[in-house]
Structures are given as structure tokens and as C-alpha cells.
Image: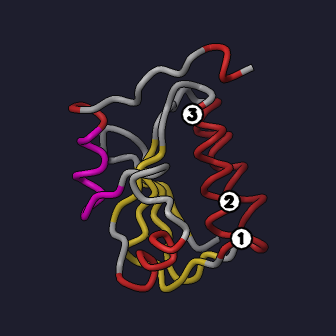
Amino acid sequence: MPYQINNKHIVPVIEIKGRFLGSLEKANFNATVEDLKTKGTKSMVVDLSKADMIDSSGIGVLIAAYTSVRKHGGAIRLSGLENRVRGVFMMSKLLGNVFEDYQTKEEAAKSFQMNPPYPLDPEMVA
């Protein structure tokens, strides 16, 4: 498991380390997100500052997690995108359109105080 959960912030921070390959990490990552939601967490940060790479299926795992969290009124925000990882997100046009990104996990976590997730239209969730 190339990630761990840091609960020292306003929201949980999932810190990804090394290579995040969706084909290998999907089941465990989804279970982690579901466990956090079961415990009452609506929003979280995914910190990629120590990620060496993420493949397209890894991005798919993050999109699925984002969709799941949004259906419950929360959001996932990213932090620590380094050049190689940032490039993958830029090519997929997910930054700004889907994911908000911040330089540090502390900034991303604090952003939930200043800018909480906007509520979803109940008809969109159905």
C-alpha cells in the first residue's frame, strides 16, 4: 500500500508515496475512502508530494473516489503535485475542472474552512 492516512489536519490527508498504479491500488484505495466515509468524513485531501508517478488508471481511481465523495456532499482536493504528476493531470484537463490543487497538504486541508464544497443538486445524485 503506497499511501497512509494522516489525521493531523482539519480533514484526513491520504499521503501517496512512490508509484500509484490504479490496477494495483484500486481495491485498497476505494476501501480506504469508503472507510473514511463510514466514519463520517465527507472531504479529504490526497497529497501527491511523494508520488513518483501516477498512471491513467490511478487517475481513474481518484476520479471514482471524487465522484463517490461528491455524492455525499464532500470533495477531494489535491496537494503537492510535482512536475511529472502535474503534467498527467494537466493533460487530462482535470485540474480546475474537477480537482482543486494546492502546494501543500496544510493549504489544501485549510481550504475546506475558507471554501467548503458546494452542495450538490439532489437530482444530480440520484
Q: Are marks 2 and 1 in contact (CB under 8 Å)?
A: yes
Q: Quadrant of residue 118?
A: top left
Residue name at image x 59 percent, y 26 percent: 72
Identify the image quadrant of residue 123: top right
| Figure label count | 3
Q: Secondary structure at mark 1?
A: helix
Task: Say which element carries label 3.
Answer: helix
Amino acid at dot 3: Arg
What residue is pinned by disc 2? 61
Residue 17, compared with residue 111, is above or below; it is: below
Q: Amino acid at mark 1?
A: Ser
Which numbered marker is on residue 57?
Answer: 1
- Give SS at disc 2: helix
Q: Is residue 37 magenta?
A: no
* Bounds of the magenta segment: 101-111
Q: Badge 3: few (under 14), some or many (20 or more) residues near its Cα, within 10 Å?
A: some
